[in-house]
Amino acid sequence: MGDIADELLPTLLDPGTFSKYYESSNYSANTDPQLTNNETVDSFSNFDDAFMNPNLKEIPSNHVCKKILYIPICQGTSVRTWDVLLFLPNLAFVIFLAIRWSSTKRKLLATHSPVYRTFHFLVAINALVALLKGLVAMSVTGAVDRGDPAAEVTDKSLWLALQFLLMMTEICVLVLGIAGAQLDSKRSILRVAVLSLLITTIFTLCQSILEFDQPDTLFKVYQKNAAPPFMLYGFGGSLYCMVISITFALVYGLVLLLPLLPCFKSIIALPNKPSFYQYCACLIIVHVLRATGSGLMHFSTNPNGLCILNFGTFLYVTAFTPLLYLAFLGPFFRTAQPTLLFSYKAQVDDVGEENVQSSCSMQFSLTQGPIDLVEEDTEESQPIVRTAANVMPPVVVEGLASPDSVCNEPSMIMK
């Protein structure tokens, strides 16, 4: 042992050893393939110090579930892969709506039900806003990656606007889906829209305060080059995202349990169409995924939670609007006559709302049944029964017949 110490000690005390080591380390730093034009890196300003501060919750920036949120789609461009993944499905759905607009407009004009028109308006505005958000996000991501605060605020504001619209649509559709037959008038729909707007505004204000004033460090990205770190959109924080997702999942779960509770059947006519409950079940899955992912991130700083949250967000942004279309508008647009989701009943409330509206109006309903016509001035409305004595010869009508013509000619049979 003494011989080895005698050999190593002079080497360690030789100043030339440290100078050679410094030169070799300096050479390796300057020849880093990621550094060009003799860039100097301040290692401490952009350093991921999560391991030095145990109380600081951070997910490594090079983790695949975090990296997919900000890496470019290809070299030479600043367009993020995540923005493209969200943009393409929305673009396809907007093209689908544009192709079917002619027949959709004709069928919507053939009904007096404002609920279906409201649903179609919500579908169209959600798809267009998601498409616009994707276009603007892909154009400002380069500035966000360079640490531009204005571009970062713009990106987060686009996300907040989209989340605001999706949440408001969820509340409107849930209320109209449960009590659509009782709220099938413009005034009632306006009340539902205002209530949904107020509730969503409160949630969005809380989320905006958390997102801009107290950003979640789990969504902070440290870059390898000289650019400063930047913040990704963090849903108002992992805790806030978990609470909101759990709340919506519980609400949809309660809706699925309502048909099993006999006390609610006497209070309100619950929908019996399977499509409505399938819609609720799909959204439960989406919100449970988001709640699980954000919970793993908040309580255990698990990077896999970010993967689950990304998957739930992808489904929510890209599949929610097509799901709404398929559940409520698809069956109506696929039929030659509006018999699947409609029933005829007298317009009791808002009689003087429109002079052009007749006493018979086609109304939204999620209960199965035949089309009936009722007279407004009778005490008990009875459906018209067509017998062989009063059946007129069939009249072939191209497309959909207007409900006014059905009310004026109650004995007409449409083919």
Image: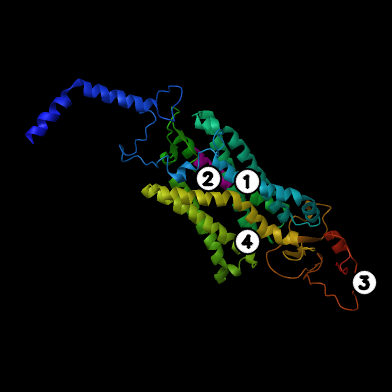
Looking at the picture, how far across and down is residue 282, in whole percent? 56, 59
Question: Which comes before the other along the chain, label 3 or label 4?
Answer: 4
Badge 3: how crowded within 10 Å, few (<14), some, or many (20+)? few
Label 3 or label 4, whichever lies nearer to me, is 3
Which residue in the protein does label 2 denote? 203
Task: Report the residue at 53% width, 40% height from top.
Answer: 205
Q: Are marks 3 and 4 in contact (CB under 8 Å)?
A: no
* CA gap, disc 1 and disc 2: 28 Å
Question: How would you rate the neighbour count of disc 1 (Cα within 10 Å): few for under 14, some for 14-19, many for 20 or more?
Answer: some
Going from N to C along the chain, the mark reached first, 2 or 3, is 2
348, 205: nearer the viewer: 205
The residue under the point 45% across, 25% down is: 36
Q: From the viewer's perspective, is 373 left or right of 261? A: right
Query: Helix, strand or loop at disc 4?
Result: helix
Is 248 on the left or on the right of 373, as rendered?
left
Q: Residue at x 77, y 61 (%)?
A: 362
Taking the image as drawn, is residue 159 in sight? yes
Looking at the rendered structure, the kind of residue marked 1 is Leu
Q: Nearer the viewer, mark 2 or mark 3?
A: 3
Q: Residue 108: image x %, image y %?
A: 77, 54
Count up the numbered dots.
Answer: 4
Disc 4 marks a residue whose amino acid type is: Ile
Q: Looking at the image, is mark 3 or mark 1 earlier in the sequence? A: 1
Q: Residues within 10 Å of mark 4 (few under 14, many from 20)?
A: some
Residue under label 4, please give it.
Answer: 178
Q: Which residue is mark 3?
A: 393
Q: Nearer the viewer, residue 308 or 378?
A: 308
Residue corresponding to mark 1: 88
- Residues at marks 2 and 3, CA–CA distance in whole angstroms: 58 Å
User: Chief secondary structure of the magenta span?
Assistant: helix
Residue 328 image offset from top left, x and y in percent = 68, 59
Instruction: Identify whether 233 is placed above or below 330.
Output: above
